[in-house]
């Protein structure tokens, strides 16, 4: 490993390694799978033009489709999301797929293969982004699948697929606009509650309004009809950037995902007494922002030391506690105050909490205890406090059969690119959420991770090597070839 890590990266790395039970038999050096173009460009079974050059070009093009000037932002059904959908739709058609958009704004591209009534393989990821996003999160999964299918189309084998293959570009995974993730994939999996249609964004528009504005009429009845028949689906596969530093540290371009951490999102509203910053004595204030600060510090300390936080209440068993200690993470990513003026004691503060862990019981125990302690702090400070649970997704275990097929596909792709390789593809846990979580309610799921620079994601600094985009496309191609 040539790269030097900062102390904070190193700490994160240790955490990731705790999450990771490697199935590698031996470790490789970081440079082992950084491919040299000169050695491999002449091979024509590697489809460099489609799987690398065109795929990278498309990632860059899609990365420019933004609602904001100067940074990438595409939220659910925004104008840029619609433009991105049109672009992807063209690429789906270029790969030989029949396309349509469903009532939740998901874009589909499908090829029936030799047997249209066989169970379909679904492959997907999301076309929405966070605010000030990187260009690979979500897009890489869609584009690598389309590139691999394009290769089958070009080399004339697409018609020989044993089962239908459907690529889905999901409309909402990040949950930025409505604080409720997986609107698209949860609808297809049949787990989106009808109440989700009435959630409002900051401007007061509901999910239903936003869809209607785009001529997509969604009602309680047709929401139920969006659910795929589990009997018509064989499995779901997703390629995604790792969003962590483990693969880079191991010097491996691809990894197989063993499971995905569960997550809860809360919205906390604290109300106090709005007043004049110059006249209300400190002892007479009911300041919701000062209270929110205390709540946020409590949250940080609970999530740093869950053992100390939970040890006295008996709500959590030893296994959950051990798992929480290595995997619990909490984030306050958004906070707003009203009326937000420097000479006004705020009247109201709202902030979000994103809380994740591999152990679902442990996560519940933390939320229970956290809520109790938060209410106590608010009571002591004479402010009111409302904790809304906006989103919950339990941890997911990836299917072992799909995972081992993806592992072989990754191995075969890397072997083609690098020649003989000694190491097995690593298997790791995902702390990030993915559409695969929602799809796991419908069918078995498997995921492939792709190395990213410095483990950075949800940032414009997110980066994947062109060669790793290529490796991902080649791995999905190898996986699809098992369906011929
Ligand atoms: C999605 O990127 C998430 O994990 O928040
Ligand atoms: Mn993301
Ligand atoms: Mn993502």
Image: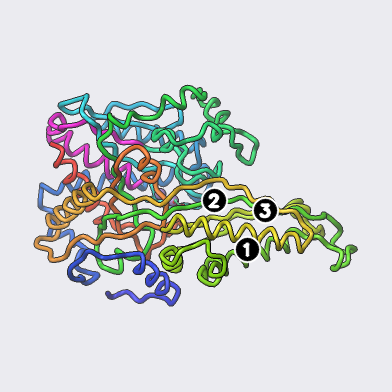
Q: Report the residue at 14% width, 49% height from top.
A: 46
Q: For the residue labelled by badge 3, is the local secondary structure a helix, a strand or a loop? A: strand
Q: Tell me the quadrant of the picture where the C terminus can be found.
A: top left
Give the side of residue 364 with respect to residue 56, left or right.
right
Tell me which segment is drawn in magenta: 139-168
Residue 76 visible in rendering? yes
Residue 342: x and y in percent read 78, 60
Crowding at mark 2 (Cα within 10 Å: few <14, some 14-19, many 20+):
many
- Mark 3 or 1 closer to N-term? 1
What mark, if any, has residue 336 been given in the picture? 3
Q: Tell me the quadrant of the picture where the N terminus can be found.
A: bottom left
Residue 359 position by quadrant: bottom left
Q: How far apart, in angstroms, are the residues tagged by discs 2 and 1?
A: 14 Å
In depth, the one of 317 and 195 nearer the eye is 317
Check contact, mark 3 vs mark 1: CB within 8 A. no
Residue 352 lies, with reference to residue 5, above or below; the image says above
Residue 250 lies, with reference to residue 333, above or below; the image says below
Which of discs 3 and 2 lies nearer the camera? The answer is: 2
Residue 215 visible in rendering? no
Q: For the residue labelled by badge 1, is the local secondary structure a helix, a strand or a loop? A: helix
What mark, if any, has residue 385 been given in the picture? none
Give the side of residue 122 with respect to residue 295, left or right.
left
Residue 467: x and y in percent read 24, 56
Q: How far apart, in angstroms, are the residues tagged by discs 3 and 2?
A: 16 Å
| Residue where numbered disc 1 is placed | 296
Find out whether residue 9 is within the magenta segment. no
Q: How many marks?
A: 3
- Mark 3 or 2 closer to N-term? 2
Crowding at mark 3 (Cα within 10 Å: few <14, some 14-19, many 20+):
some
Residue 65 lies, with reference to residue 351, above or below; the image says above
| Residue where numbered disc 2 is placed | 265
Q: Report the residue at 56% width, 65% height from top.
A: 313
């Amino acid at each position: 490993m040539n790269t030097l890590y900062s102390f904070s990266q190193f700490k994160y790395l240790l955490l990731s390694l705790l999450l990771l039970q490697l199935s590698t038999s031996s470790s490789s050096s970081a440079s082992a799978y950084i491919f040299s173009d000169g050695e491999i460009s002449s091979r024509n079974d590697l489809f460099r033009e489609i799987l690398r050059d065109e795929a990278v070009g498309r990632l860059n093009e899609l990365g420019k489709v933004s609602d904001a000037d100067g940074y990438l932002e595409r939220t659910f059904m925004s104008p840029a999301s619609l433009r991105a959908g049109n672009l992807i739709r063209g690429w789906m058609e270029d790969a030989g797929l029949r396309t349509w958009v469903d009532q939740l704004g998901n874009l589909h591209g499908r090829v029936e293969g030799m047997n249209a009534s066989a169970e379909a393989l679904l492959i997907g990821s999301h076309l929405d982004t966070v605010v000030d996003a990187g260009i690979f999160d979500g897009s890489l999964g869609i584009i690598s699948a389309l590139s691999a299918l394009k290769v089958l189309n070009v080399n004339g084998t697409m018609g020989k697929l044993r089962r239908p293959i459907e690529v889905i570009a999901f409309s909402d995974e990040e949950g930025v606009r409505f604080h409720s993730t997986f609107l698209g994939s949860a609808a297809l999996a049949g787990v989106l509650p009808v109440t989700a249609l009435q959630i409002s964004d900051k401007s007061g528009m509901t999910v239903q309004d936003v869809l209607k504005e785009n001529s997509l009429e969604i009602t309680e009845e047709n929401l139920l009809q969006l659910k795929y028949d589990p009997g018509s689906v064989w499995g779901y596969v997703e390629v995604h950037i790792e969003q962590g530093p483990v693969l880079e540290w191991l010097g491996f371009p691809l990894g197989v995902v063993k499971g995905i951490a569960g997550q809860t999102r809360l919205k906390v509203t604290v109300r106090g007494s709005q007043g004049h910053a110059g006249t209300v004595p400190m002892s007479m204030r009911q300041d919701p922002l000062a209270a929110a600060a205390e709540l946020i510090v409590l949250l940080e300390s609970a999530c740093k030391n869950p053992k100390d936080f939970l040890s006295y209440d008996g709500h959590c068993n030893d296994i959950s506690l051990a798992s929480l200690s290595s995997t619990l993470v909490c984030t306050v990513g958004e906070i707003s105050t009203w009326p937000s003026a420097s000479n006004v004691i705020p009247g109201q503060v709202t902030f979000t909490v994103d809380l994740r862990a591999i152990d679902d019981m442990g996560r519940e125990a933390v939320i229970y205890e956290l809520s109790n302690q938060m209410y106590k702090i608010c009571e002591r400070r004479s402010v009111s406090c409302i904790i809304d649970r906006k989103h919950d997704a339990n941890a997911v275990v990836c299917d072992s059969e799909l995972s081992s097929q993806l592992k072989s596909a990754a191995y075969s792709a890397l072997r083609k690119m690098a020649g003989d390789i000694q190491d097995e593809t690593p298997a790791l846990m995902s702390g990030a959420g993915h559409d695969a979580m929602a799809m796991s309610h419908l069918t078995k799921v498997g995921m492939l991770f792709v190395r990213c620079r410095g483990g950075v994601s949800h940032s414009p600094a997110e980066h994947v090597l062109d060669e790793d985009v290529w490796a991902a496309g080649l791995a999905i191609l190898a996986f699809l070839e098992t369906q011929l």
